[in-house]
Amino acid sequence: MSDTALEAVLRRDRAVVTAALVVIAVLSWAYLLWLAADMAMPMAPGADMAGMDMASMDMGAAIAPGFQAWTPADFAFIFAMWAVMMVGMMTPSVAPMVLLYAGVGRKAQASGRPIASTAWFFTGYLLVWIAFSIAATCAQWLLTSLSLLGPAMASNSTVVGGLVLIAAGLYQWAPMKGVCLRQCQAPIAFLASHGGFRSDPLGALRFGTIHGSYCLGCCWALMALLFVGGVMNVLWIAGIAILVLLEKTVPTGQLIPRISGALMAIAGVWLLVGAF
């Protein structure tokens, strides 16, 4: 294949992968917006309860099961909500790495040394965040059972909210944050330090989980902030997603995490002072 033909194919592949990532992110955000709108929908005065669809009446309870004991269906619903949320929030920030994988994959195939499909790598990455969604669902159940999380899925304790903000702010300055962020900011360096792309699907899947694990180490404390501002607060979700994207793609090293971390810690202290 000539260089010109290969460049054309690479551009086409990049466009296809980009479109796929955009579709995944848009569908995830559309689902979250639908859930948030349904949760916030007030019941009209004088509405005929008998004529209402019982499934729609129970939707708000399913989104925020409240203080009653959760059923297996509640766990499944909240887990699905977290999983979709993580996909929507993290897909934009991993896009540079996925596009790099797709480009290298096409060149490798043209040279007769193919590597595993990009889908395997991306799936491995998402599996890490799906596992995190299980932990987040359990954390939400625990906070709800302890009456520390209200029906709006935001902390109803100023003290807890302040402590979470301070903890997240301090982690932004932690050495572990820096180590993980550097792996996410430099895809080529990440490849070089982990042996490059894999030719077998399971190897690519594991490679994706390695990258996802660094991403989780970089961002887990930011995700904990969802319990402060509201798990279904769309503006809060979008703000955290934008911060994650900026940290990983803007070449400022540790500047953005440290500025944001200082602001989080200050906000947390302010909440604690106001609580006493």
Image (cartoon, grey):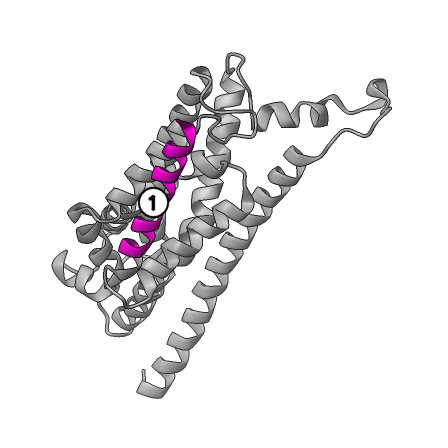
Residue projecting furthest to the top: 69
The answer to which of 117 and 11 lies nearer the viewer is 11
The answer to which of 39 and 90 lies nearer the viewer is 39
Q: Is residue 167 visible?
A: yes
Question: What is the secondary structure assignment of the residue under circle 1?
Answer: helix
Q: Residue at x 44, y 34 (%)?
A: 227
Q: Residue at x 44, y 46 (%)?
A: 87
> Residue under circle 1?
266
User: Does 75 sit left or right of 190 as displayed?
Assistant: right
Does residue 182 lie above or below 224 as drawn? Answer: below
Q: Residue 150 placed where, x, y %?
A: 52, 24
The answer to which of 69 and 259 lies nearer the viewer is 259
Query: Hey, what amino acid is under mark 1?
Result: Ile
Tell me the quadrant of the picture where the N terminus can be found: bottom left
Does residue 101 lie above or below 170 as drawn? Answer: below
User: Does 185 sit left or right of 267 as displayed?
Assistant: left
Q: Quadrant of residue 68?
A: top right
Q: Is residue 198 visible?
A: no
Q: Main secondary structure of the magenta part?
A: helix
- The number of numbered badges drawn on the structure is 1
Magenta-tinted stretch: 257-276
Q: Residue at x 59, y 25 (%)?
A: 62
Q: Residue 272 placed where, x, y %?
A: 37, 32
User: Does 252 sit left or right of 4 as displayed?
Assistant: left
Q: Residue 6 placed where, x, y %?
A: 34, 80
Does residue 69 lie above or below 143 as drawn? Answer: above
